[in-house]
Amino acid sequence: MSSTSAGLQYELSDDLKMLQNLARDFTRKEITPKAEHYDRTGEWPWEIFNKAREVGLVNLNIPEEYGGLGASVLEECIVGGEMAYGCTGIETALMLNQLASLPLLIAGTAKQKEQYLTRLTEEGKIMSYALTEPDAGSDVAGIKTTAIKKGDHYVLNGGKTWITDAPVASFFVVFAKTNPAAGHRGMSCFMVERDYPGVSVGKPLEKMGQHAAQTAQVFFENVEVPEENRLGAEGDGFMIAMRVFDKSRPPVAAAATGLAHRALDEAVKYAGERTTFGQPIYQHQGVGFMLADMKIRAEAARDLAWKSAWLVDNGKPNTTEAAIAKAFCADAAMQNATDAVQVFGGNGYSREYPVEKLMRDAKIYQIYEGTTQIQKLIIVRELYRGSK
Ligand SMILES: Cc1cc2nc3c(=O)[nH]c(=O)nc-3n(C[C@H](O)[C@H](O)[C@H](O)COP(=O)(O)OP(=O)(O)OC[C@H]3O[C@@H](n4cnc5c(N)ncnc54)[C@H](O)[C@@H]3O)c2cc1C
């Protein structure tokens, strides 16, 4: 047996540390000080997006030949985790192009990638990912939007909801049924431009948190979509959506981890300064143990998120690990934010302090990109895969 642990490299390479430092500095200067403004106004953070684009912190996963950085999922996790520390709403708004690029990267032709990905990198456009419908969120195969073939184009009818960045998006990746009778096998995926006749976008929906990441409904009324805009073959839509999750869940888990760390740091600082009964409150065991539990969660969360990214980057299956990471990190974010509010006492409930925002922002991690219950369904399914 080897007496060394050199086979497992358990620290970031110098390049990854540099990337992390770049994202950390950017967050400290450009995101954290402006988080309160975007939370209050609900404006989309164009100014921050454009600055992040200049320094190469958005459109990370787009290959270099289309003007992106060709980043790994782990690199997305590192950058996303740092930015989310400053504000998860801004981080989500900025990172949506990466999620929406995935169907193109998975199933797009060279021509389709050239046509759309370069508009993100060269023109600074935004793309949204439109899967969810009012009657179909967790039940992806239950979508009702149809895309019926007519000659050399498809006619799209239906509506999507909760589409992040839709109010500012120039185009959408849209999932629709090309064969409504065929269940999940009848689902296909299309690039749909915002200015196609019949496409309309609702007003930003009012929501609990992550106000900078505007979400809206998107409607399609007899929208003619050229056949060449279909990604993959007819019927590939469900497979594309499932493959997206393996690459999109690790960065979402990493962003939740960023929030879990922020909640911890805010609570540690406050508990060191606030005194009751003659001592800093962290010295009361009830508070100290809460901080210890927050630290445990934040550390474990980061490892799970990064491991699920590392697996997919190395061509290994990660469906279970991505589901574990998404479920654990989301719960860690929510619990740490709730505990941070508790540590702050009455001040935790005040908008004058940063932790009530963390609590509002954290909740969504247990819902989008597959709810916590859906992650557990996946874990159980994978536990019994192959057994009868
Ligand atoms: C702020 C925000 C941003 C979003 N951004 C996007 C986006 O950009 N693009 C996009 O396509 N979608 C987006 N979504 C949609 C999001 O992915 C869905 O809301 C989510 O998947 C849950 O679907 P649902 O809302 O229909 O809830 P439902 O599926 O109706 O679930 C309701 C409850 O039932 C539980 N449940 C459902 N089925 C099961 C089951 N089989 N077993 C156990 N429990 C179950 C769920 O866990 C949940 O607790 C966003 C949502 C929000 C709120």
Image (tube, rainbow, N blue to C red):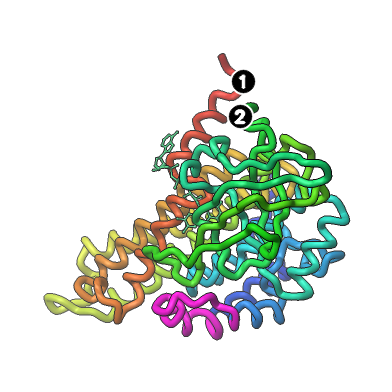
Q: Which residue is mark 2?
A: 183
| Amino acid type, mark 1 | Gly
Q: Which residue range is magenta in the image?
A: 28-47
Q: Is residue 370 above or below residue 212?
A: above
**Residue 147 location in percent, x, y?**
68, 42
Question: Residue 38: x percent and y percent?
Answer: 46, 78
N-term-proximal mark, 1 vs 2? 2
Category of crowding for the residue at label 2, using alpha-carbon neighbours closer than 10 angstroms: few (below 14), some (14–19), many (at least 20): some
Q: Image check: 385 left or right of 331?
A: right
Who is closer to the viewer here, 34 or 156? 156
**The N terminus lies in quadrant:** top right
- Which structural element holds mark 2? helix
Residue 63 is situated, as x and y percent measured from the top left of the image, at 80, 62
Write down the quadrant of residue 50 in the picture. bottom right
Inspect the magenta stretch and tell me whether residue 295 lies in it: no
SS majority, magenta? helix
Numbered badge on residue 386: 1
User: Which numbered marker is on residue 345?
Assistant: none
Of residues 261 and 122, the one nearer the viewer is 122
